[in-house]
Amino acid sequence: MAFGKYAVDYEQRVDFDRLRKERLQKAKDQMEKDGLGTLVTWDAASIRYLTSYYVTTPTRGGEMTFVVLPRNGEPILFGAPTPSEFERRMPWMEGRVRSGLGVPKVTARSPEDLGMIVGTVGSIMAEHGLEKEPVGLDGSTLEMWYGQAFEGAGFEAVHGKPTLDEARIIKTRDEIELMRITCANSESAFADIADAIRPGIRECDLVGIGIKALYEEGADHTEDLVCCSGYNTNPFTWSFTDKPIRPGDLIYIDVDGSCYMGYMSCVYRTFCCGKATQEQKDLYEECRAMLYAGIGAIKDGNTSYDVVDQWPDSAAYWGFDNWLEVMPYAVGHGIGLSLHEGPGISPVAKALNFPPVEFKEGMTIAVETWTGKRGGKDGVRLEEDVLVTKDGCEILTRWPIDELMECWR
């Protein structure tokens, strides 16, 4: 990263005021391009993108928090627990934080039950002269009902997720710096995990050690880490159990969904408990070479197909009959305020003739590969987070990857 993560008076670091303004302008520009008058989002990441409000994890499932963004106005936040307090804490939202309007995901039984929310949004649209223009809906499991309710009230409702996806896919300078910081935080987790690997420690213990390190680095949220060892590494899966680590076990770990100011990392590394066999080292190098062959094809103007063309051209490489069985074995996904966002990279997409995605400067992408013989004992998983540049990509994740790391020796 270019600078430290904390605020100081002697150098310019992340400029949060600029971050908020540039993100909001990108959303408005995309609304203009897509012909939307208003956006309504219940998605926690998009809410943060538009307002910087952090939707706590216990409240996300209920969809009690949402934002209304008129294209020619400022975002209005509904659902903060005490609006006046959050306006004090978030002065850039002064006058635009309002109480929630219930928990329709729990209480609604038909589109008619959404009338209060539709009426409130409709009033905002009318206030801004946008009632004749489409309203985009994003991030609600009730989107079909919301669409029916808006159309029943005389508004045109459309799917709003593509607009926010497109706005968010190219990162601003401050978003990129936050991505560098969150990737650096993952290194602290790996350092503590590597020190702790020894016979008898359990997968779940390593997950707890990694999460503790992330919060000590200032993470504001993290998902459970993936930690698979020994026979749990083959075939590929993503989870963790109370299985104890044994000498000779491979252990792959994903520091996934660790957030710093909302921005997430997704980084796999594979370790060995004790001295690795030559077969394990060869399997590791096979996975690493596949990963870097794909990364080598990432640059502005290339496409997802250019990456896929560097990878095995058949599911038979992993010992399976069709691509759907090995869909997560070699993939790439955009990463930012969401763990999985655009662009996507997948051999399955090419096999099904989905159009390729063009890479553009400023995209941040997690690229991951897995190797292992079907029916074998060991599997290796590796992943890097990269920033697309004009002439290639910058690798944001720096935990050593050149060779299989042997722990407890």
Image (cartoon, rainbow, N blue to C red):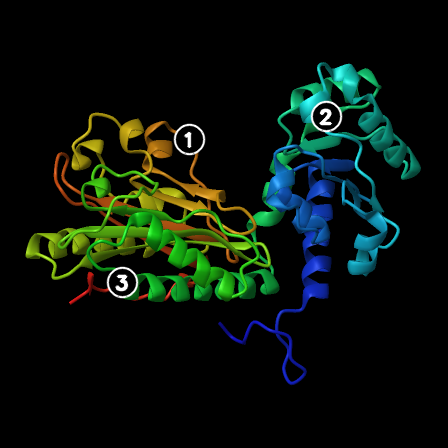
Q: Relative to the observer, which residue lies in front, 306 or 184?
A: 184
The residue at 33%/38% (across/down) is 328
Dot 1 or dot 2: first in sequence order is 2
Residue 268 location (% of width, % of height) = 33, 53
Secondary structure type for disc 2: helix
Secondary structure type for disc 3: loop
Dot 3 or dot 1: first in sequence order is 1
The image quadrant that residue 145 belongs to is: top right
User: Which of the two discs, 3 and 1, sits closer to the camera?
Assistant: 3
Give the class, few, some or many, for how many residues have Cα within 10 Å of label 3's Cα (few <14, many ≥20). Answer: some
The image quadrant that residue 166 belongs to is: top right
Give the class, few, some or many, for how many residues have Cα within 10 Å of label 1's Cα (few <14, many ≥20). Answer: few
Residue 348 location (% of width, % of height) = 34, 32
The residue at 23%/41% (across/down) is 232
Q: Name above or below for residue 268 compared with residue 353.
A: below
Residue tagged 3:
401
Residue type at mark 3 is: Ile
Secondary structure type for disc 1: loop
Residue type at mark 2 is: Pro
Residue type at mark 1 is: Phe
Figure disc tally: 3
Dot 2 or dot 3: first in sequence order is 2
Residue tagged 2:
104
Q: Is residue 77 left or right of residue 137?
A: right
Quarter of the image for the C terminus: give it.
bottom left
